[in-house]
Image (tube, helix red, strand yellow):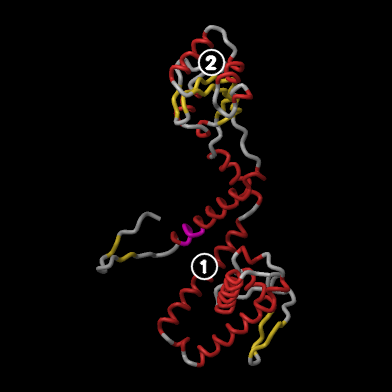
Amino acid sequence: MYSGSRYLGLLAAIALAGVFVIGGASGGIAAEGADAPDPVIATVDGENIFASELTAAQAQLPAEYQQIPPAVLFGLLIDSLIDTKLSVAQARREGFDKLPEIVQRLARIEDQVLQRAYLEKQIEEGMTEEALKAGYEKFVAESKGGEEVRASHILVETEGQAKEIVSELAGGADFVELAKAKSIGPTSDKGGDLGFFKRDGMLAEFSDAAFALNDGEITPTPVRTQYGWHVIKVVERRQARPPMFEEVEGEVRNRVTRDIGLEVMKTLRAAAEIKRFGPDGSVIEAPPK
């Protein structure tokens, strides 16, 4: 069912997941909440292993293993949790939990878990409809909206060919027909129509020339890019449509999450007395709060 290398990878991932759950990195919190039923799925020397620990262990697995059927994972995850319980118990019996370096590492893990839990709670409370609306409005204001142009172009290999096309157009030739007949660009069959684009949507040389034109104008001199020589015509302009909230919800939530976290830490810093010291013990002037 699984290749040898993938199976070994799965076993390694499951082993690590069990270590992180029982070892304290994720805490074995029940997925359905503190009051939800949490049945015992195994015991090790009288110590219970709960279903919530299995759920948490599965959540620690890499994305590529998340979709493996539960029936396949169930036994492997339980074995991993049992092995972790056994190893931890033996480590305690041998006094590993009293070693200074282990005590320090456990203290750091505890600090990280507490910090994450605190910030997650603040973010959950701060992620209101009002905050999301404000975040979306800020995103729209900061996003690259502005002006878009709809342009067509005729792309040829040499400057001489491009200048000849400019002359033909000045003499009344039809842009669309020339593009169909002479352009080597992929939009030649559409008369060179590129549709609407923002300034950063094309190469800088092309965009600079296009955005300098008024509606209906054609570049008086050919424009060179890495693809060849262009004769450009601007058809029309418009203001870019701001993205709908549903289109950028993930990005907005990430921004609001970041802003809440920064504000929480700013508040905590403002209320604390903080001193900084350099490697030589000298006092370092703290930046303004």
Q: Quick one: which residue is furthest to the top in this view?
A: 171
Front residue of this view, candidates 132 and 171: 171
- Label the magenta part by its dominant secondary structure: helix
* Residue under pointer 1: 115
Horizontal placement of 103 versus 145: left or right?
A: left
* Residue under pointer 2: 217
Say few, some or many: other residues with alpha carbon within 10 Å of mark 1 (under 14 / 14 to 19 / 20 or more).
Answer: few
Tell me where residue 43 sits by quadrant: bottom right
x and y, in percent, of residue 241 in the image: 62, 33
Residue at image x 29%, y 61%? Answer: 284
Seen in the picture, residue 104 relative to 288 is either above or below; the reply is: below
Amino acid at pointer 2: Glu
Q: Is residue 235 magenta?
A: no
x and y, in percent, of residue 27 in the image: 59, 75
Front residue of this view, candidates 205 and 253: 205
The numbered mark, 2 or 1, whose residue comes first in the sequence reads 1
Horizontal placement of 244 versus 110: left or right?
A: right
Q: Quadrant of the N terminus?
A: bottom right
Seen in the picture, residue 136 relative to 56 is either above or below; the reply is: above
**Magenta stretch bounds:** 264-268
Give the numbered dot on residue 181.
none
Amino acid at pointer 1: Gln
